[in-house]
């Protein structure tokens, strides 16, 4: 009997958030499973590819776009956001001011990118990442109020939120799976 044909999808995913929140570290952890504390901010646009066997006959190629140094300007161009199907907004749980950036990044996304026509042109799914959660465990920063975060996400149109650590490799796979699931559900 013939195997069912394999279907492949390419998803462009944006990773935005204030400088130093851990965007590059999250991508490197997710794609290459490495972490380093060397803070080297690159300038320009960078992207990494993660290939996922989503189901026996479905392969998803996640193209993760890293804004790489451009975040200091607080927004990105439409060209950069073009054809993205999902996004992560990242903040640093030890720096409350980076949470203030979250609303601004969400607003930037919603105003500049929409789902392609066949999908009705609504906002793309966005997942909020509360990163550096390993530092919370060490007693830095304020513990996260889960109910408040759930409510914040609901009120501000985030699909969900996850407490992540690029250092400890926690919850990044889960967050990515959730985002992919949200995109798959639209198709
Ligand atoms: P970006 O500017 O958003 O791309 O942030 P980077 O990925 O360059 O990370 C900024 C700094 O935070 C670097 O020194 C990282 O090593 C550190 N960092 C990133 N993620 C984590 C994390 O989950 N835990 C801890 N403890 N440090 C992190
Ligand atoms: Mg970076």
Image (cartoon, helix red, strand yellow):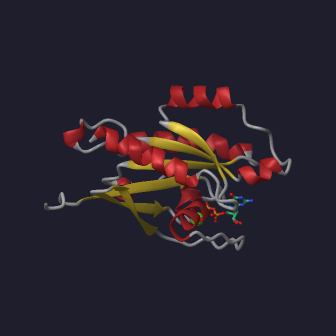
Q: List x then y, in percent, for residue 70.
A: 52, 62
Q: List x then y, in percent, for residue 146.
A: 67, 31
Can you say whether 44 is above or below 149 in the image?
A: below
For the image shown, how many numbered marks are present on the structure? 0
Can you say whether 123 is above or below 63 in the image?
A: above
Q: List x then y, in percent, for residue 52.
A: 39, 61
The extreme front residue here reads 1
Q: Residue at x 44, y 61 (%)?
A: 64
Q: Which residue is drawn at 24% across and 35% down?
A: 120
User: Quick one: 58 or 114, which is closer to the camera?
Assistant: 58
The extreme left residue here reads 1
Is residue 74 visible to us here?
Answer: no
Is residue 142 visible to us here?
Answer: yes
Quadrant where the C terminus lies?
top left
Q: Residue at x 52, y 45 (%)?
A: 105
Can you say whether 137 is above or below 143 in the image?
A: below
The extreme right residue here reads 139
User: Quick one: 16 or 31, which is closer to the camera?
Assistant: 31
Compared across the picture, whether 37 is left or right of 187 comes to: right
Q: List x then y, in percent, for residue 1.
A: 13, 60
Can you say whether 84 is above or below 46 in the image?
A: above
């Amino acid at each position: 009997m013939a195997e069912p044909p394999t279907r492949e999808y390419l998803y462009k995913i944006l990773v935005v958030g204030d400088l130093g929140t851990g965007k590059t570290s999250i991508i490197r952890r997710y794609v290459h499973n490495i972490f380093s504390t060397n803070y080297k901010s690159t300038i320009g646009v960078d992207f990494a590819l993660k290939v996922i066997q989503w189901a026996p006959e479905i392969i998803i190629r996640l193209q993760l776009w890293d804004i790489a140094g451009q975040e200091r300007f607080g927004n990105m161009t439409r060209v950069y956001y073009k054809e993205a199907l999902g996004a992560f907004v990242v903040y640093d749980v030890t720096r409350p001011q980076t949470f203030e950036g979250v609303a601004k990044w969400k607003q930037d996304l919603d105003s500049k990118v929409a789902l392609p026509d066949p999908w009705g042109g609504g906002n793309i799914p966005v997942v909020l990442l509360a990163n550096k959660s390993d530092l919370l465990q060490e007693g830095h920063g304020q513990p996260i109020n889960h109910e408040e975060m759930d409510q914040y996400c609901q009120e501000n149109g985030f699909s969900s939120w996850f407490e992540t650590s690029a250092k400890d490799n926690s919850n990044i796979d889960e967050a990515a799976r959730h985002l992919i699931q949200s995109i798959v559900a639209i198709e």
